[in-house]
Structures are given as C-alpha cells and as structure tokens.
Amino acid sequence: MNNDKLKDTKKLLEEDLKIASNEKELNDLKVKYLGKKGLITELNSSIKNIPNEEKKSYGLAVNGLRTLFNNIYEEKLEIFKKEELNKKISNETIDITLPSKKIKKGSLHPMTLITEEFEDLFVSMGYTVYEGPEIETDENCFQKLNVPKGHPARDAQDTFYLKDEFENFLLRTQTSTAQVHAMEENTTKGPLRIVCPGKVYRRDEDATHSHQFMQIEGLVIDEDVSMADLKGTLEMFCKKILGEKTEIRFRPSYFPFTEPSVEVDVSCFKCQGKGCNLCKQTGWIEVLGAGMVHPNVLKMCGYDPKKYQGFAFGTGIDRFAMFKYGIPDIRTIYGNDIRFIEQFNRKDDTYEVK
Ligand code: DAH
C-alpha cells in the first residue's frame, strides 16, 4: 500500500514537473510537494504509521522522492531563468532610431583659430614653432635685442615687473625675445627658421590696446638671406591670411633689433584700397614690423654676423583677428563672453548624447 503511494507520487511528480512551463508553476509545485501540507511532506510525516522494520526503507524512498523533485526543479528553474534573461536582453536592445538630445559643442577661441592658421602656414613653409617664456630677464627682453638700459625704445614698451627675489624678472613685451632663446639654444649656430606665437604684456589699456595681447614672431637665419626673401615671405603670409588680392608695401622704419627696418602695410581688405573708415581713407593698413636682423643681435646671441644674415618680423595676432573677423574692441577677445566666442563656431557644430 505504502509502496503504491510512493510510486503514484513519483509518477505524478514527474508529470507535474514536465508540464510546468514557467517559474511560477514550478514554485506552485514546490508548495504542492514540499510545502507544509505538501504530498512529500505528508508521506514523510506518515512514517510514524509504518511498521518499524519498514521504516528505514520507507524513509529512504521518501528522501529519494524529495531529491528527485529538487533535482528536476533546479534543472528546470535554471532553464526558465536563462530564458527570462534572454527575453530581457532581446527586449532591451537600443532603439537607434530614437532622436537623442543635442548638446552644444564648445568652440575654439578666435585667437586659437587664427594662431593655428598662422602656424600651419609657416610650418608648410618649413618653419618650426618655437615658444619662449613669458617671464623674462631685462637682458633677454631688451639688451640682447640691442636695446640697452636707458634706450628711448623702451618707453613704448613699459611692462609689469616681478617683486622681491624675482625683481630681475619682467613679463615680456614682445615675442622678439623668443629670438634670443632660439638663437642661444641652437648649439650648431647654423640656419634657423622659426615662428614664435605667444602672449606679451604692456602697460596699455584702451579699445585697441590690452595689457595682455598676442604676437607672432618670425626669424630666419641663413648664409644668403636678403630683403627680397623677407618681402616674398610676408607677401605670401598676408595673401594667405587676408585674401589673395591683398597687396603689401614696405615703409622705412626703425627697430633697434633690425637694420634696415620696415613697417609693412597691407591694402585695405574692406575697400580694396579705395579708402574707407577702416583704413582712415588711406587705402593701407599697417600690420607688421620687420627687417634684417641687426649684426649686434646676431653677435650677442652667439652667431657670426660675417657669415650669417637673417630677417625677422613680428605682428599682433589680435590685430589680425580684429581685421579678419571685424572685431571692433580688443577687450572682447579677452572678455570670455560665450556669445562672442561661439560666433566662431562652425554652423551646426553639435554632437549627440544619449
Ligand atoms: N617686436 C616689435 C614690436 O613688438 C615688432 C617687430 C618689429 C618684430 C620688427 C620684429 C621686427 O621681428 O623685425 O613692436
């Protein structure tokens, strides 16, 4: 009788577990067989009614049933869990057709843009970009550029001086000082072809002058360099930056570190030289200082002026940016007003995030 009951329960249990098609049904079966009033639980508690000599084999058989149930249960549970996970994964695939939020990309500052344009142009002509320090000695900023103490050319370049133990240092007033470093560092004392962009400082402050602004300096040293090379280089430079129709002219000038020295004008790109408010009706706009490197400078920086000549030029990058982009007040360049800076962004320059 007991054996029949065990056999029936085994058969029923196997059928039930076979039919169970999800986790819930499986758990219901657990209650049906192993719950407080479950079939196997009941078989177990009826052991008290079994004659002593059969108790052992009966107990083993009931335990066998429990193990059987648990084994099939675990096996099926694992299958259901896997199925559920797969279902979840396939339901959660990303819908790439969904439009996402657009976030505005930051834009490069106009000074960065124009500096990179200058650098690219000169690098394409075989120059190297060289950056000198902004904190300088009087010697490098002035004396080695042929501007001794008390020289009147210093008046136009008053600057900021450091204090206490750094009182011999100042903020450079011109990128020309980078020439000194480049020449001194060049141990071969051979040819040199560099452009030096960077910040410079002066005690100035109005709509067209800022206490901090940017310059770019060019220096070429070689054994056979002439004014013609300088003119050709600057003509190419101005045409590439300001437009192919741009013409240039040299006016004699004076800089202590060049001899002869020139100031370079470009034909007004607003009126094409006819005369307008930008060029003050002259048709020309002054953009650069330049000249042949003074032999004293070559000598002080370790070069033999009998063997080498060179040309140099320097210009305000801010000034070019103001012309190129039509910026009326230099202070807006350093004002960090996002409405100003983002005008230099390319259109629709956005990227998407989820
Ligand atoms: N350093 C000069 C200035 O700040 C500009 C300049 C003039 C640079 C003539 C040069 C040069 O290299 O040859 O006004």
Image (cartoon, grey):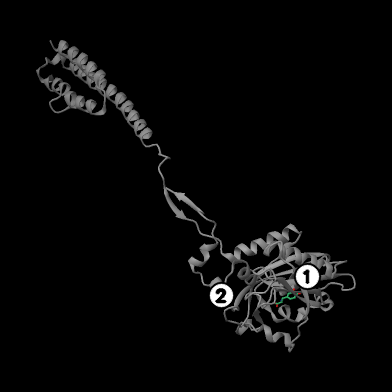
The kind of residue tagged 2 is Asp
Q: Which mark is residue 183?
A: 1
Q: Is the CB atom of the residue marked by disc 1 within 8 angstroms of ligand 1's nearest atom?
A: no
The kind of residue tagged 1 is Met
Q: Position of residue 65 (x, y in %)?
A: 22, 19
Q: Position of residue 191 (x, y in %)?
A: 82, 64
Res. 129 in view? no
Q: Quadrant of residue 344?
A: bottom right
| Residue at 75% across, 71% down | 313
Q: How many C-alpha atoms fall within 10 Å of the one at disc 1: few (<14), some, or many (≥20)?
A: many
Q: How many C-alpha atoms fall within 10 Å of the one at disc 2: few (<14), some, or many (≥20)?
A: few
| Relative to 14, residue 313 above or below | below
Q: CA distance from mark 1 to mark 2?
A: 36 Å
| Relative to 242, residue 38 above or below | above
Image quadrant holding the N terminus, namely top left
Q: Quadrant of residue 245?
A: bottom right
Q: Are marks 1 and 2 in contact (CB under 8 Å)?
A: no
In the rendered structure, the answer to whether residue 41 lies left or right of residue 196 reads: left
Q: Is the CB atom of the residue marked by disc 2 within 8 angstroms of ligand 1's nearest atom?
A: no
In this view, the residue in front, 67 or 192, is 192
- Judged by depth in the image, the label closer to the viewer, 1 or 2, is 2
Q: Position of residue 155 (x, y in %)?
A: 69, 87
| Relative to 168, residue 283 above or below | above
Which residue in the structure is indicated by mark 2? 329
